[in-house]
Image (tube, rainbow, N blue to C red):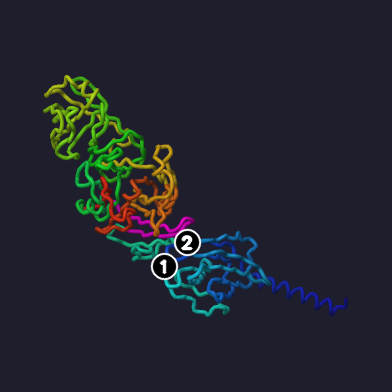
Amino acid sequence: MNRFLKRAAVLAAAAVFSWQSLAFAADLTTVRFHSGSEHDRVVFDLSELPSYKESLSDDRRTLTLDFAGTKDKRLQKLPVKSSRIESISYASKGGHLIVTMRLKAGLAYDLHTLKNPVRLFVDVMPSGAAEFQTKTPAGSDRKGQTKPAAGAGASGASTSGRAGTIDGDYIEDVAPGLTKHTYVYWDDCGKVSAWLIEADPSKYDLRLVLAKGKVPGRETVSGIAARAGGTAAVNASYFASSGDILGVTRINGQTVGTTYYTRSAFGLRADGTPLFGTVSYNGSVTMGGVTQPVGGVDCERGADSLVIYNRAYGTHTDTNEYGRDYVVRGGRVTDIRQNDAPIPQDGVVVSVHGTVADAFAGVQVGDSVTISEDFGSYWQDAVTLVGCGPRLVENGRVHVTASEEEFPSDIRVGRAPRTAVGVTKDGRYLLAVVDGRQSHSVGLTLTDWAKLLVKFGARDAINLDGGGSTDLVVNGEVQNSPSDGQERAVGDALVLVPKR
């Protein structure tokens, strides 16, 4: 080969090398996907923004992105499939990366780019939800312009406010120190709709309030919140059909419910300091030198049992004639009734049946009475205590204890409407609900519920009563859609009340 030919070959090789360097100027490093309330979003992370073409097929269902000078050698291709996107495929051809997105019928798309970090993202939405924001005609070359992302709102729910940092989250400042999140997204099972309230503890007291002010009693969460003067509230304890509270429960330092199980609980000290842990109740009553265990507080009296009734139960015990009621004031028996004794405002009634009644048969008016209640040393300063569960979040991590706490399958297994109380990492109270069993929300498993709470900054959280009881009220209005079709009357509620 003569010198002329050699020189030509070298120049040709250099040109090829230079073209290849230019052709592969950008790397597509990752592809990410999120399904939000009103759109699905596919995000392409790039080392730099290349020139690209976009084109849409005649049937408006195949979107093609042609990235010039882009390679995906290190890319782990994401197998996207959702209610809006049928598939995404990738191909390399002549220094171009071709991405093909197959959309489901009746959908539109919107394309945006960012410069820092460098990314291109495509939002897919119902064709009537938004006009195409893309200014350049399909099929033309362009460098993407930086545009704000399209917002995602909750179908059938208020989405006023500003978009949060989590896609699908809308934030509204309800009042000073009180923030509401409306969060809607899609997962593999369908649409999920959740609402969360964050409250500054320096501006709000969190109170446990009984339905109709007593046990037993049932009332809607909106009714409870209105009576308490609350700005926001959620349903709280498990409860019996009568309204008896099921779980170790204290209000203003007074016990109003118990259980035989050791279960997760949320509590508050007098200064508002939150407490999370497991709690069990051990109580005993000593009268006339005889001691017997407490079978329950403010609940229906069972066979061979002892129940304590206090002013939270109302004016009378409503017990039947097959037992005996001891009225106790100032640490002494002041009256003995066969049944339905009046409950003193400054005392209690010890009601007994069967073998326990036999044990106390010798007790007389004037005998001393000692009542002992033990919740464990951790809870000794708790003036408010909600025994519910299971635990969802501990120290900022998912920690679901449904099996250890022996919850039944209707709570432990599957997707359902859920309610939770927690505290964020910056110390704010957190009340949260997620709808379920409806077209706008399929509900969540306990584990997914815990993950959602962690996503929104929960440091600690426990599950509260759910299902048809799930209910969040803000400023007198129900925010979610209870699965009963209307608010269920519940036994109590956690209410955020502005501090004076």
Q: Is residue 308 above or below residue 74?
A: above
Residue drawn at (31%, 37%), measured in percent from left and top? 379
Q: Quadrant of residue 89?
A: bottom right
Q: Say whether residue 241 is left or right of residue 167.
A: left
Q: Is residue 87 above or below residue 142?
A: above
Most frequent secondary structure within the magenta stretch? strand
Q: Amino acid at mark 1?
A: Gly
Query: What residue did someone put label 2 on?
Result: 35
Which comes sooner in the sequence, label 2 or label 1?
A: 2
Task: Give the CA distance from mark 2 to mark 1.
Answer: 12 Å
Q: Quadrant of residue 331?
A: top left
Residue 151 numbered mark, or none: 1
For disc 1, the neighbor class at 10 Å (few under 14, some 14 to 19, many from 20) is some
Q: Is residue 67 above or below residue 468?
A: below
Q: Which residues make up the magenta segment?
A: 179-201
For disc 2, the neighbor class at 10 Å (few under 14, some 14 to 19, many from 20) is many
Residue 371 image position (x, y, % from top left)? 22, 28
The N terminus lies in quadrant: bottom right
